[in-house]
Amino acid sequence: MNLLVDSIGKQYRGNVWGLQDISLQLRPGVLGLLGPNGAGKSTLMRILATVTRPTRGRVLWNDADVLSSPDPLRTVLGCLPQDFGIYPHLTAFEFLEYLAAVKGLEPCSARRRIDELLSVVNLTDVRDRPLGGFSGGMRQRVGIAQALLNDPQLLIVDEPTAGLDPEERVRFRNLLSELSGARIVILSTHIVSGVEAVATDIAILNHGLLLAHHSPESLLAAISGKVWEIIVPSPALPALHQQHLISSTAHRTDGVHVRVVSDSPRMPQAQPLDPSLEDANLASIAGSRTAPARVAS
């Protein structure tokens, strides 16, 4: 099982490039796709879901060209878009039954699969309630179930834990971990904590550029020795923001505990910290802002 993204670019009107020269090779596991809003994550996922065609480049699924022949990928594809919609008058079971028919699943096996998935997403007790009465988190769980209907080999999910309570988030992340051994999962989010517990690889996008694609361990190793804690009084915080890249702050009785990403903060009170993926993500994005701009030709 192999998904190859080869030099993908997407151009919009006015010579605006939403993606530039994106190359990834993915095998079974969870790819955490990180980047701020507008980084190009949704554009890339729409291309991989065969909804949008790139301007240049190619996508190969098991060495077959997806752009010229998308059906082999579509039959093994599951998607949960961020703007997942429902039919409010259908029950959860009816809605999933309808989508199973759209995907061409045999009715008898589809019903068994729906029963199984409703249990997985903890909606068995409300399976016969109209979706219009569901909370946002419950609707999101229905979306997760529909993405898994055809037991996909490639699963693409966009901000999947939006609207879920903390317990549901943990449940969903555990589910992704269980699924990832036998399929490729692409999990897109701008919240690092949403992927750090499950991702086997991390890709970071910003302004349509791929800034990094490494294992979490490699990303952490790259900024080892570059994360510090500095304690300053509250009035000194604005000046510190001007001088250093700050990952987080926390107000305490002895002052503001500031997490700084820097080769050397040159402050005697700075104490080294173990790096986090949030630090690595922030450092990658900040570095892209100071690097020379790339223009696709």
Image (cartoon, helix red, strand yellow):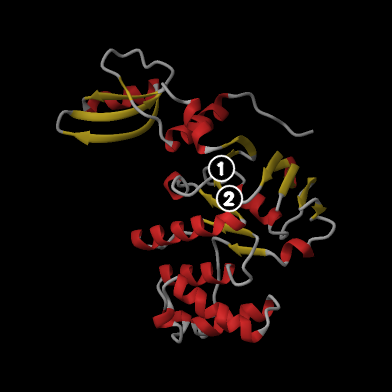
Q: Quadrant location of residue 258?
A: top left
Q: Which residue in the structure is indicated by mark 1?
A: 201
Q: Secondary structure at mark 1?
A: strand
The alpha-carbon separation of the residues under discs 2 and 1 comes to 8 Å
Quadrant the C terminus occupies? top right
**How far across and how far down the image is residue 208, in percent?**
64, 40
Q: Secondary structure at mark 2?
A: strand
Q: Compared to 294, does 136 lie above or below?
A: below
261 or 240: which is nearer to us? 261
Q: Amino acid at mark 2?
A: Gly
Q: Compared to 283, does 156 lie above or below?
A: below
13 vs 143, left or right, is right
Q: Compared to 37, does 122 lie above or below?
A: below
Q: Which residue in the structure is indicated by mark 2?
A: 29
User: Around disc 1, counting alpha carbons within 10 Å, would you say few (fewer than 14), some (14 to 19), or many (20 or more)?
Assistant: many
**How far across and how far down the image is residue 42, in percent?**
61, 52
User: Around disc 2, counting alpha carbons within 10 Å, would you say few (fewer than 14), some (14 to 19), or many (20 or more)?
Assistant: many
